[in-house]
């Protein structure tokens, strides 16, 4: 080829080079246009969703598609800011995920972005100082791109992308695209959170209205408590909901209501305040949370009922007369998200309403009980002032008339009628005592317990013991001393029925302001010289345990007399 021919072909070569460069620029522009179009589509796709779980899934799928990566994941940072609470993946089949094992919690290179929330792009992730390898059966990964996702300036989680298809490395354009997607993702996540919170608030409001309607319609306390626990469990997505109430004077709690899980095994269970999450809420009078209820060594009390459970919260149900009325325990399955402040806030308001419901039910029950007692007092007064007095007057008239009856048979019949009237008066007096005591299902006072005990002893004795009571027995005598009084009286009446062969038993109980005194006297055979004394010893020990005493004597006219006393101090 001559020099002239070479010179003639040089312009053609330059033209070809220019055309190739122009085509490359056109292809780059078309690629940029297509990428921008894909990015806009991804932003719109992510923004259309309102369900938070679906939003997160779409974000990680869009990230993988935009930079053409083989694998992608989105790690959600837990409230403690140190670990991952959720991990969504793209590129791994369910079988591969199961073979690899549990999802990562934020160690190694994944934790690097948690500690330093900045874009991280690597040609080889194994060469980074924070990398410590992958678990068995995990695919080998080389290139890496990590970008934090922020929601209102707070790091929500991180996008992790590995192994760009074709063996290429992630470049600055890829980094820019994922950063843009992360900004849009933050807005979408915030919107989904707000929507979720609004839905939850509506659910709480509906539940509150339902409880209010139940209260106004006169629902019982048990119905209100069950409704409270059921709605709280549904709204928070808890596996179980337990309502426990303090057992007075024992330092323990009793599970009054159990929903979900092995509820039959938990219902009625008595657990200590110390060493239980519910007990801690009662002691602090504030909500207490835990990330792993079954595995946390601090809450060992009754832990067997929490097998398979994870995050939990215990919320006290307010105060009634200065005392915690109860505590609501909600627990989720192991591995589920912990309870957040966003959930606990509305739960506190719900618990306050629940406490109001319990107090209102208590006040309504007291009012009904008071009305019943007033009605019984009226009936008792009418029986005493009208019926007994007229019967007594009739008996006196008949007794006087009997002396004027000359026929022996008629006189005996009149005297028998007088005796029947005396028995009738005794029955009415016993009825008056019963009317002035509370109903057996609700009575807790010492006075009513003693009345029931004396009535129950009548079949064994063969007659009704005489009973007299004085003083403020229901208010001045502490619960512990009242329990001892009832136990001692039961033993004394049992002894009279089995050993005394008595025709009359008199029971006297009085509270003097400084001590409670119980006297049981009969006209039987007295105290045998030989015989078992274990029951008497137990009664004496009960008195001594309270700082009191017991005296057993034989009156001059026969029988036996037991006097048992205990101080009312403190």
Image (spheres, rainbow, N blue to C red):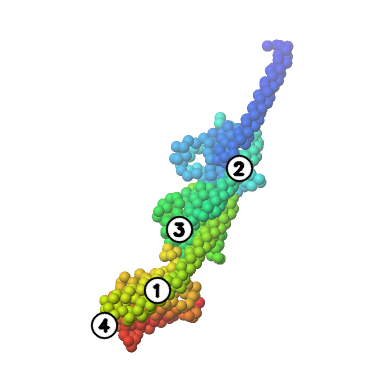
User: Mark 1 or mark 2, which is nearer the start of the sequence?
Assistant: 2
The residue that mark 3 highlights is 256
**Viewer-nearest of labels 3 and 1?**
1
* CB contact under 8 Å: marks 2 and 3: no
CA separation in Å, label 1 and label 4: 46 Å
CA separation in Å, label 3 and label 1: 49 Å
* CB contact under 8 Å: marks 2 and 1: no
User: Mark 3 or mark 4, which is nearer the start of the sequence?
Assistant: 3
- Image location (x, y in percent) of residue 217: 53, 53
Which residue is at 54% across, 59% downward?
360
Which residue is at 50% across, 51% downward?
227
The residue that mark 4 highlights is 530
Mark 1: give few (<14), some (14-19) or many (20+) Cα within 10 Å.
some
CA separation in Å, label 2 and label 3: 35 Å
CA separation in Å, label 4 and label 3: 49 Å
Reply above or below: 225 against 432. above
**Viewer-nearest of labels 2 and 3?**
3
Camera sees residue 208: yes
Mark 4: give few (<14), some (14-19) or many (20+) Cα within 10 Å.
few
The residue that mark 1 highlights is 391
């Amino acid at each position: 080829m001559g020099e002239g021919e070479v010179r003639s072909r040089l312009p053609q070569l330059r033209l070809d080079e220019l055309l190739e460069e122009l085509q490359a620029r056109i292809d780059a522009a078309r690629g940029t246009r297509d990428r921008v179009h894909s990015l806009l589509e991804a932003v719109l796709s992510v923004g259309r969703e309102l369900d938070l779980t679906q939003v997160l899934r779409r974000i990680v799928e869009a990230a993988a598609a935009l930079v053409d990566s083989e694998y992608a994941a989105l790690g959600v940072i837990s409230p403690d800011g140190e670990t991952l609470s959720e991990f969504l993946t793209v590129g791994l089949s369910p079988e591969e995920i199961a073979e690899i094992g549990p999802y990562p919690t934020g160690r190694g290179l994944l934790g690097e972005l948690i500690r330093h929330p900045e874009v991280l792009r690597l040609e080889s992730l194994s060469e980074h100082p924070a990398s410590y390898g992958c678990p068995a059966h995990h695919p080998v990964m080389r290139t890496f791109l990590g970008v934090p996702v922020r929601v209102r300036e707070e790091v929500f989680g991180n996008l992790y992308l590995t192994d760009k298809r074709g063996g290429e490395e992630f470049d600055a354009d890829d980094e820019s695209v994922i950063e843009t997607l992360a900004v849009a993702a933050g807005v979408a996540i915030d919107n989904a959170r707000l929507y979720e919170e609004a839905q939850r608030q509506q659910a709480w409001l509906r539940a509150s209205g339902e409880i209010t309607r139940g209260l106004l319609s006169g629902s019982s306390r048990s119905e209100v408590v069950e409704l409270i626990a059921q709605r709280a469990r549904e709204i928070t997505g808890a596996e179980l909901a337990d309502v426990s109430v303090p057992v007075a004077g024992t330092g323990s709690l009793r599970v009054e209501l159990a929903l979900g899980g092995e509820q039959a095994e938990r219902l009625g269970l008595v657990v200590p305040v110390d060493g239980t999450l519910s007990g801690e809420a009662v002691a602090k009078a504030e909500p207490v949370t835990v990330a792993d209820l079954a595995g946390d060594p601090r809450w060992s009390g009754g832990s067997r009922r929490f097998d398979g459970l994870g995050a939990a919260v215990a919320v006290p149900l307010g105060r009634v007369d200065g005392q915690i009325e109860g505590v609501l325990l909600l627990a989720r399955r192991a591995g589920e998200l912990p309870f957040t402040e966003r959930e606990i806030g509305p739960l506190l308001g719900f618990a306050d309403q629940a406490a109001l419901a319990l107090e209102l039910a208590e006040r309504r029950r007291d009012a009904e009980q008071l009305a019943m007692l007033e009605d019984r007092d009226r009936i008792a007064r009418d029986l005493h002032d009208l019926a007994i007095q007229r019967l007594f007057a009739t008996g006196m008239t008949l007794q006087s008339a009997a002396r004027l009856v000359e026929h022996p048979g008629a006189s005996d019949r009149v005297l028998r009628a007088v005796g029947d009237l005396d028995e009738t008066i005794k029955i009415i007096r016993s009825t008056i005592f019963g009317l002035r005591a509370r109903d057996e299902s609700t009575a807790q006072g010492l006075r009513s317990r003693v009345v029931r005990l004396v009535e129950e002893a009548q079949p064994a004795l063969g007659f009704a013991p005489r009973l007299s009571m004085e003083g403020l027995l229901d208010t001045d005598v502490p619960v512990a001393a009242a329990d001892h009084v009832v136990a001692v009286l039961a033993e004394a009446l049992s002894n009279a029925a089995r050993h005394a062969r008595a025709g009359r038993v008199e029971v006297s109980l009085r509270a003097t302001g400084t001590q409670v005194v119980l006297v049981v006297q009969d006209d039987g055979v007295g105290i045998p010289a030989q015989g078992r004394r274990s029951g008497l010893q137990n009664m004496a020990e009960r008195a001594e345990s309270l700082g009191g005493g017991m005296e057993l004597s034989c009156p001059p006219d026969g029988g036996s007399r037991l006097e048992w006393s205990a101080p009312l101090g403190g």
